[in-house]
Image (cartoon, rainbow, N blue to C red):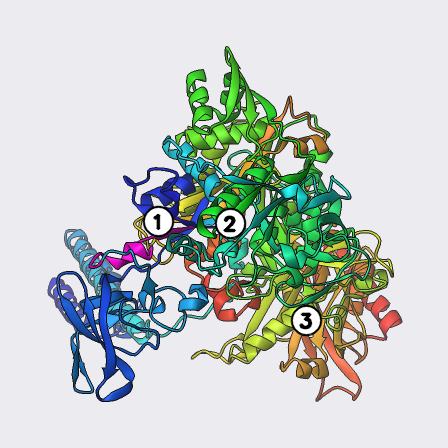
Amino acid sequence: MFVSLNWLKNYIDLDQLSPEELADKITKTGIEVEGIEYIAEKNSNVVVGLVESCEKHPNADKLNLCQVNVGDETLQIICGAQNVAAGQKVAVAKPGAVLPGNFKIKKAKLRGTESNGMICALQELGIEEKFVPKDVADGIFVFPEDTEIGVDALPLLNLDDAILELGLTPNRADAMSMLGVAYEVAAILDLPLRLPREDVHMVEEEAKDYIDVEVEDTTLNPYYGAFVIKDIKLAPSPLWMRNYLIAAGIRPINNVVDITNYVLLEYGQPLHAFDYDKFDSEKVVVRRAKENEKIVTLDDQTRVLSPDYLVITNGKEPMALAGVMGGKDSEVDENTTTVLLEAAYFDPAIVRNASKDFNLRSESSSRFEKGIDPERVKRAGLRACQLLEKYAHGKILSGIVNVDGLDLTEKKVEISTSKINNRLGTQISTEEIGNILRKLHFSYENNDEVFEVSVPTRRQDIVIFEDMVEEVARIYGYDNLPYTLPQGDAQAGGLTKQQELKRFVKNYFESAGLSETITYSLTSKEKAPLLASDEILQDAKETVSLAMPMSEEHSTLRLSILPEMLSSASYNLARKQTDIANYEVGTVFVSKEETITEQPSERLRATGLLTGDWVTHEWQEEKKAVDFYVVKGILTGLFEKLSLAVSYKPVKKENMHPGRTAKLYLNDREIGFLGQIHPQLAKDFNLKETYVFDLDLDYLMDQYEEIPNFDRIPRFPTVTRDMALVVKEDVLAGQIIDTITKAGGELVKDVHVFDVYQGEHLEKGEKSIACSILYLDPERTLKDEDVEASYQAILSRLQEDLDAKLRS
Amino acid sequence: MKEKLQELEKEALLKVNEAKELKDLQEVRVAYLGKKGPITEVLRGMGKLSKEERPVIGELANKVRENIANELDGKKSTLEAIELEKQLENETIDVTLPGRPVQIGGPHLLTSIVGEIEDLFIGMGFEVREGPEVETDYYNFEALNLPKGHPARDMQDSFYITEDILLRTHTSPVQARTMGEYNGEKPVKMICPGKVYRRDTDDATHSHQFTQIEGLYVDKDVRMSDLKGVLNRFAKEMFGEDREIRLRPSFFPFTEPSVEMDISCKVCNGKGCSVCKKTGWIEILGGGMVHPRVLEMAGYDPDVYNGFAFGMGPERIAMLKYGVDDIRHFYINDNRFLKQYHKA
């Protein structure tokens, strides 16, 4: 809503406040002023002048040589406008004037002749082209004949105005009118209001002899009022009205249309003027449209209708789409002499149907949709009649032909001083609350500290006690509320164990060298299942897609975080960021249904992506690229911190390197995977050798147990025995470690691989693995024979199970 | 004999003095004090002396021995110190060469901001709650006083999966879920951070996915001044003690009265600049007193309980606090962006 301050000053005395001060007060009280615009900040030295003579320029066909009387002098001005003529009163920018765009007017010579100023068009004075009335769009602007010569032209054109742009929240439909804004400002500043009076002089002839009104469903159209105005003379509307419309962002058209728009802005009540003769009927019938019924609206579009929309008909055909836009067939034009004026109340929902489906958001529909003031409907019609009589030579026929089912009773809301103060934490006195209600123009009955407030119909947003709390609070001033802290029982806030553990896991990854990413949950349908862990794929029947995605790229919920991480890595590589070590913790969305009927389950995953160098090349050492074991080391460290025994098994998985991928198990349950992505997939994403992991974080956190008891520091020494074995090359280190652990007995505390060798001194197809075995007896000093017995048991089991020999 | 001893002493001390390395000293020690050395020899020949002479010479011999030994020890310390100094000099390195880099990662900026806000509210007695990102229409809208047909829940603004299931458009459903869980019986004091989704085209200030943190406090006799006090503490801790806050009336379907909170602009200190659009204030969050319908639907009797709620966007806070100029930075994950915020 654009509010012209000059217009507002008709209702309320604002001269003691600057626009900025006023804007600040309005914003703090509840309606955000999003901007202040000065129509023409830079104009100066522009006056009204009389063109005393106008001749052709001796040396130029298209230029006119004018003598212009500007009061204290007569200026010779060369003017290029087609419409300039002697006897006109025009806007003259004198030498020294500055026009918008910092355009300075100086004395000049044009084709040998002196020119001492400029005769201006409205555009040149800073009015936006789209608001300039068509009749003056192609030339200079001409003032009415009775305009005084030599006076400042800017106030006459309202160019000294400031416009406040209000950002209205949906509840404040009352402020979609100048009167509504006037009530608001009067309440804020505690100033008296001057409201317009709808004095109409009606002729003897009666409207009911011209028109009848029938409304099919009064819930959709509780009020329809028809006015008939005869002997209309279509002309431009008065300058002040045109100025205000321009300030409000509406282009002036002619007096009849301008008056309906003016009243729309002033009262917040949309009106519609039909050409009575073109309406071609003595009866207005308001009904739901029929299926496939058609109407050509004022914007020349043919609209195909249905019973979802309400139409105004002449008993046969639709003449207007109710509350949204009029029909072309009954449009007011230069030949119009009799006007049928509509002032009505339409149901917000049915207006919204039409404005939404036809994408026709107009000044009119936006007001009906949010709910207009029922009390102002008829008055707005009368106000328009008053103006039509005055500015369009109209004769107002007696009587309003109407169907009236409007409820004008004011809602009652009870408040009390103590309840208000309890809710706000304030100590506002009963007297002060009464004063606030008076400022708001809310009437009330007061008994001790209890008020029964009658809410004016213009404030449809106030229904319950809490709404009144807000009214009192905002006029009292949010700034004046004290600062307190909750007085309820003190609670210890905090994170849950799971939340703490999640933070721990994230901190661990960071200390291990990984940077956290946050990627989009929505990905493409194609990427959604890519690299998803097998236990996720087994549960997910189908990926979950949006009904109406904005793009294919973000259409489907992810089954793995990795695809978007691959895209991020790819983005980085393209920008020469080649060393990447990322992790992300987030949810994936798994649905067991083919057609979704319930929420998918959300599983927490921890994923990682590493590529490029792990150790960068420095002066004292060689660089080292990320490999499988770097990533595995990070994961092993995590599992150790969580005291979880996770095992790794080689696996072949789609899109993963067939020889460098491991599946992870905890308690015989799959908890994710780790490995190098398939070089083909890497190529598809423009990546080099890239390693990823994906872990079931829900399960890992679930299995974590806080260490219950102190683990005693051993009092007895440990013994270490090394063992170098020769095995077939397909025997896995994991198998050897498992065998040693199982065969070695309770005394074996740790098995550690310290060397793997293949090549010279070994048979082809063989490899050597060297382990060190750590023995400890927590109860006593180990005896050599105990260790030896275990060592031998291990050896023979290794020989039996894995065909391992001691390396000689 | 006496003369011989004095001669030996003189000779030995001279040699000690002349010694340049530790091994020279060792030679002197062996030559003069060793078992086959001249002093031992003198002592061995004592038997030939008279009773009177014997103690005199014995005493002298011991004294000479002692003097030489002392001198040897002193010289040894000196030589050792010199040698150590030489060794250390050889060990000198270029301390201006770079150290070995340590691989340390770090959190995403949004995680840091969310964590900071969580800790701040935990300090004020709030618990942290989480909820599903894919929500039902009921929890996302209806339970928050946004019945079907409400203009603010346009299909066009939300990512629906089915007519009844959608990606949550705010974290407020967690409030409704938590209140439901508490059965209308005990106070609720919680914040809920999380990802939310809206049908926006991604540009510098819009993102179809972003983060939100909502807070809720429900108890008996909660006052609007409590909301103001809590938000004021939050703003000062988050943006600095010198920031002013301002509450303005606003509108949300789930609160009444509703507020928007501004903080004074840090760039211009409230004077007005391009960052604050010349107003001197920057909007950072919305909130209000919980609407009685919302309490009622969650099973709380609005005649007994009331409360306040608020919601904020960590992206916006990060953008204000660190001057991040494009919301897309948070989701593109440019390495150079991520690493900028790993600092303490």
Badge 3 sits on which subunit?
Answer: A
Foreground residue among A220 and B45: A220
Whether residue A787 sits left or right of residue A440 in the image: it is right
**Which region shows up in magenta?**
A149-164
* In the image, farthest residue toward the left: B3
Q: Quadrant of residue A607?
A: bottom right
Above or below, comparing residue A274 to residue A447 in the picture: below
Q: Are marks 1 and 2 on the same chain?
A: no
The percent coordinates of residue B283 (x first, y second) are: 45, 48
Circle 2: residue type: Gly
The percent coordinates of residue A396 (x first, y second) are: 54, 44
The percent coordinates of residue B73 (x first, y second) are: 24, 62
Circle 1: residue type: Gly
Residue identified by numbered label 2: A394
Q: Quadrant of residue A196?
A: top left
Q: Which circle marks residue A553 in the picture?
A: 3
**Could you tell me which residue is drawn at 38 percent across and 52 percent down?**
A240
Q: Which circle marks residue B280 in the picture?
A: 1
Label 3 – label 2 distance at C-alpha: 61 Å
